[in-house]
Structures are given as C-alpha cells and as structure tokens.
Amino acid sequence: EDQVTQSPEALRLQEGESSSLNCSYTVSGLRGLFWYRQDPGKGPEFLFTLYSAGEEKEKERLKATLTKKESFLHITAPKPEDSATYLCAVPLDTDKLIFGTGTRLQVFP
Amino acid sequence: ETGVTQTPRHLVMGMTNKKSLKCEQHLGHNAMYWYKQSAKKPLELMFVYSLEERVENNSVPSRFSPECPNSSHLFLHLHTLQPEDSALYLCASSQDPLWAMNTEAFFGQGTRLTVV
C-alpha cells in the first residue's frame, strides 16, 4: 500500500537550534517528492520539488534531501517565523498526491 | 496570496442544509483539486479535474458533488452532510497534472466547514 509517514509529529526548538524533519514513503515507481509549509488557518505553500535520490534543494534556512526511501528537511538556525506545519507529498500515477500527516514545528525565541 | 481564492472562508451549516463552496484561479492552470483536511489526518484528495473533466473521484460520498464549469472555477456542492464532515476544505490548482512532476500545486486558504 502506498504510504507517506512523517516524523516527529511535533517538534519544539529554541531559536538557532538546528534539526531535521523526516518523511519516509513506500510507493511504487517514485517520481519525486514535494515539500509544503502550512501556517495555521491557511492552505499549504509550496517549498521544494525533489526528483531523484541524491538531489538537494535549499531555500534560506531550509534544505531538503532525498534518498530512495526517505526525505529530510533540514532546518538550520531556525527563527520563530519558521514555525509552521511541514508536509511532504508524493504523486501517484492517477494524479493523486499522497500527503503525510505533517510535522508541527514550533520555534521559540 | 497564491492566486487561488476560496469562498467562503468559514461556513456553519445544519445537516439538512444545502450549500456550495467556491474556488477560483486566474493562473491559467489546467488542473484543479478538492482536498479535505481533518485534524490529525493527512490531506485527503476528493476530486481532480483536468481540462474541466473529472479524472479522479476518490470514493467520496455522494453528498459531496463537484462542478467545474470552466478552467478557472471549481465548486463543491454540499447537501445532507454529517457532523464528521466538519473539516478544512482546500482547493488547489496546477499547471499540469501533478504526476508529471513538472509543476506544483497552489492551494487556496481553505473553507473551514462546521456541520451542526
């Protein structure tokens, strides 16, 4: 069964304390992976697309990496404005996008 | 603003009511989607429209009825809903079908639906 799992479910960090979020998946014929950020009361906002194992993408304090089984979202020296829920998603052939349940990140000053 | 606008932002309806959610995009995208987001659950795909034709109906109960009159507008008609249908309903659009991996989805702000 196609499945996307994110961990941890919630993460509390002190400002400046770097960490990583994990997204593991079991899908056949992986063609890539998306990362989204969602603020409370809003729709998800696109962050990255990763197409193949070994690929890395960076944006400000965020870096996303992809292996054959999982993806990591590394957050370096986070700030309070990085607080949000981070979602990963994997597309299937039927134009279905399977989302994980997300990691709720809180960064305290 | 992502270019995808949903109305209303909040909706409270009784189980016997009929209401509609509206989604509008002026990004020139060819695919539009309805998602349901419930607490502690992953985003669930409900419907996909590509070039105004429905291409995916993810086993959604018939009390939810989508309509895509043109490439810029998408509706979700609601009738005789249940309290467990209370959730955030998100509309999204993309230039091409998402499986092609050459595009990303742009989401609206969502409609927070409460069924009483």
Image (tube, rainbow, N blue to C red):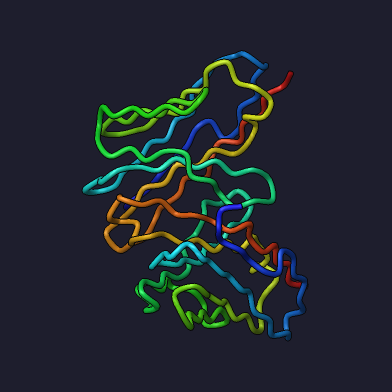
Residue lying at 53% horizontally and 81% vertically, measured from the top left: B65
The quadrant where residue A26 appears = top left
* The C terminus of chain B: image quadrant: bottom right
The quadrant where residue B75 appears = bottom right
Depth check: give the residue in front, A50 or A103.
Answer: A50
Depth check: give the residue in front, B29 or B55.
Answer: B29
Residue B4 higher or lower than A56, as above or below: below
**Is A40 left, or right, of B65 in this rendering?**
right
Residue A46 position within the rendered picture, expressed as x and y whole percent measured from the top left: 48, 44
Residue B94 position within the rendered picture, expressed as x and y whole percent measured from the top left: 41, 59
Depth check: give the residue in front, A2 or B77.
Answer: B77
Depth check: give the residue in front, B58 or A84.
Answer: A84
**Is A85 left, or right, of B51 in this rendering?**
right
Total marks drawn? Answer: 0
Residue A21 higher or lower than B83, as above or below: above
The quadrant where residue B52 appears = bottom left
Residue B109 position within the rendered picture, expressed as x and y whole percent measured from the top left: 63, 57
Residue B104 position within the rendered picture, expressed as x and y whole percent measured from the top left: 40, 51
Residue lying at 68% horizontally and 66% vertically, measured from the top left: B86
Residue B27 higher or lower than A58, as above or below: below
Residue lying at 64% horizontally and 79% vertically, measured from the top left: B20
Residue lying at 48% horizontally and 74% vertically, measured from the top left: B60
Residue A99 higher or lower than B8, as above or below: above
